[in-house]
Image: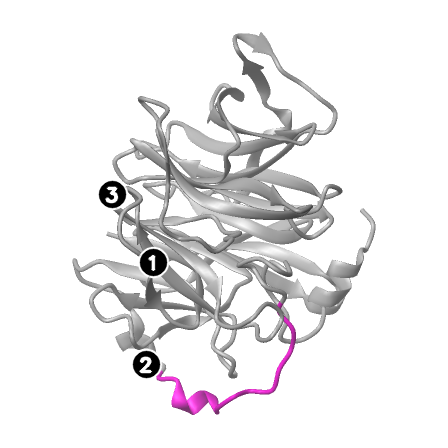
Amino acid sequence: MRLSAPWILRALPGLAGALLVGTASAAERPVPPSHPASEVPAASPGAARPQGSGGRIFFRYNGVDDNYGRLAWAPLDDTGRPRFAGELRCEVAYATAQRGICLAVEQRMLGLFAAQIFDPSTFQLLGKVPVQGVPSRTRVAPGGALAAFTVFTAGHGYASTSFSTRTALVDVPHAAVMAELESFAVTRDGQPFKNADFNFWGVTFTPDAARFYATLSTGGQYYLIQGDPKTRRATVVHANVECPSLSPDGRQVAYKKRVTTNGIVGWELQTLDLASGRETPLAERRSVDDQLEWLDNRTVLYTVPSGPPGSSPSTDIWRVAADGSGAPQLFLRNASSPAVVR
């Protein structure tokens, strides 16, 4: 694997994230702290544990200070103050009630990363899987037995025509890769479907964790596939779907839909009703390059830069109705990689 320019950029201190310019995943670059870390409250280890039955959200803290990149959490009814999850620092993260995954830097100057598996109640590191590529997406299945991650092995953004990805399913209890999506047998319209330029990314699991959805790209086209981890088979179910996220009830997929205007690639947010195939554009009009998260069955969350593209590494999490109504609302400042634990 060649050591491309994005690898070198990611080796610089303070750089993390998607490195995409002109979209909602703006390029991140080192900037001086805007205020000392002591101004950002960090609870003590005992107080920081997210116990109790109330819902909470895990996220990557993106405030421009010494806590930049740390894994944090907050109660859903009190998102104004981050509680930091031990010392974990992540490029991308996700968590369920049982297990969490943090795609983290192992050796920054060499561009080495690892998928760190942790207990979301104690933040104890339970295992790790080497990651050969620049982190992009990750998910944990309900129940915590399976996880998935996507990395760039060439290129550094989905707007490019020359990127290449690797997407792996992880056996969480054994901290080991159980399969790569590139090895799955894919069918479309009942016929075998295979091309040399296949790329997969953006896994999302069904509520029973028996199936998953993901994006498959080939020949400039982008497909939603449904896969079975046990049989290593997948089927194309819809066109022009990127970075799917399945609703808690398993009925809808929220995703970004690629649009090209005057040669510039952007993405519109949509939801797809899996039973009817009906697509619904959401009220967010900005281009958003993110894998959405569901706050509940009616609302989705996504990440947008805090300022103009390239001006700051800080991002915010926004919310919008999944039925296309209303208007976007700011949900959580200085954050990315939302993971709602209900």
User: Which stretch is magenta?
Assistant: 28-41
Q: Calculate the distance from the C-alpha at mark 1 to the C-alpha at mark 3.
A: 16 Å
Q: Nearer the viewer, residue 161 or 31?
A: 161
Seen in the image, is 295 located left or right of residue 192? left
Q: Is residue 150 magenta?
A: no
Indicate which disc residue 260 carries.
none
Q: Calculate the distance from the C-alpha at mark 2 to the C-alpha at mark 3.
A: 33 Å
Tag 3 or tag 2, which sits nearer the N-term?
2
Instruction: Please say whether residue 176 is visible from this viewpoint.
Output: yes
Seen in the image, is 291 located left or right of residue 130? left
Q: Amino acid at mark 2?
A: Ser
Q: Amino acid at mark 3?
A: Asn
Q: Name the colouring of the figure.
A: one colour
Q: Is disc 2 surrounded by few (<14), some (14 to 19) or many (20+) residues within 10 Å?
A: few
The residue that disc 3 covers is: 297
The residue that disc 2 covers is: 44
**Main secondary structure found in the magenta portion:** loop
Q: Calculate the distance from the C-alpha at mark 2 to the C-alpha at mark 1.
A: 34 Å
Q: Is disc 1 surrounded by few (<14), some (14 to 19) or many (20+) residues within 10 Å?
A: some
Q: Residue furthest left?
A: 53
Indicate which disc residue 328 carries.
1
Instruction: Please say whether residue 228 is visible from this viewpoint.
Output: no
Residue 149 at x, y percent in the picture:
54, 45
Q: Residue furthest top?
A: 190
Query: Residue drawn at (57%, 41%), measured in percent from left and top?
Result: 259
